[in-house]
Image: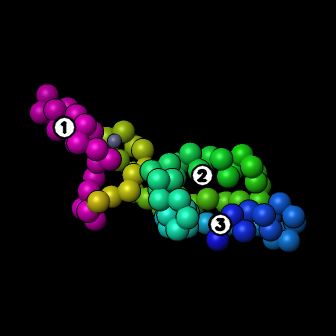
Amino acid sequence: MITHQIECLERGELDKMVITVEELREKISIFQREARQNVDAMARYMRHRLGEAIEIVDTRPTCAYCGDPFTAQRKTAKYCSTKCRVAAHRKGNE
Ligand SMILES: [Zn+2]
């Protein structure tokens, strides 16, 4: 459990924890389903709480329009949202 790893880090039993955003999302979902939507907030919280002791690697694709990382519903997805897809399409047609 991720909470156990955090406790170990705080007690100094672990030197460092490296986790990808996808792993973080997976681990959060085990005990707190609603937190899956808040993975970015959780990542910020963990960085704040653990500082140098945690490295969160974001392997998600980034939106071709706004540049934000997003969790793709399909492998071919280029945009984070319909809003960005539409905006990119409009820009391309101008
Ligand atoms: Zn976007």
Report helix, strand or loop for mark 1. Answer: helix
Task: Give the label on residue 49, or none.
Answer: none
Residue shown at the point (36%, 39%) measured from the top left: 66
Disc 1 CB within 8 Å of nearest ligand 1 atom? no
- Residue sitting farthest toward the left: 93
How dense is the environment of label 2, judged by Cα within 10 Å: few (below 14), some, or many (20 and up)? many
**Residue at which label 3 appears:** 2
Quick check: 19 left or right of 75?
Answer: right
Residues at discs 3 and 2 in contact (Cβ within 8 Å)? no
Reply above or below: 76 against 47: below
The quadrant of the rendered image in which ligand 1 is seen is: top left
Nearest the eye: 75 or 23: 23
Residue shown at the point (27%, 39%) measured from the top left: 84
Residue 88: tell me if it is visible: no
User: In x, y percent, where is residue 37?
Assistant: 45, 50
Inter-mark Cα distance, 3 to 2:
12 Å
User: In x, y percent, where is residue 23?
Assistant: 53, 68
Nearest the eye: 16 or 13: 13
Task: Give the label on residue 86, or none.
Answer: 1
**Residue at which label 2 appears:** 43
The magenta region covers 74-94
Reply above or below: 36 against 41: below
**Residue 77 is inside the magenta segment:** yes
User: In x, y percent, where is residue 10?
Assistant: 83, 60
Disc 1 residue type?
Val
Inter-mark Cα distance, 1 to 3:
38 Å
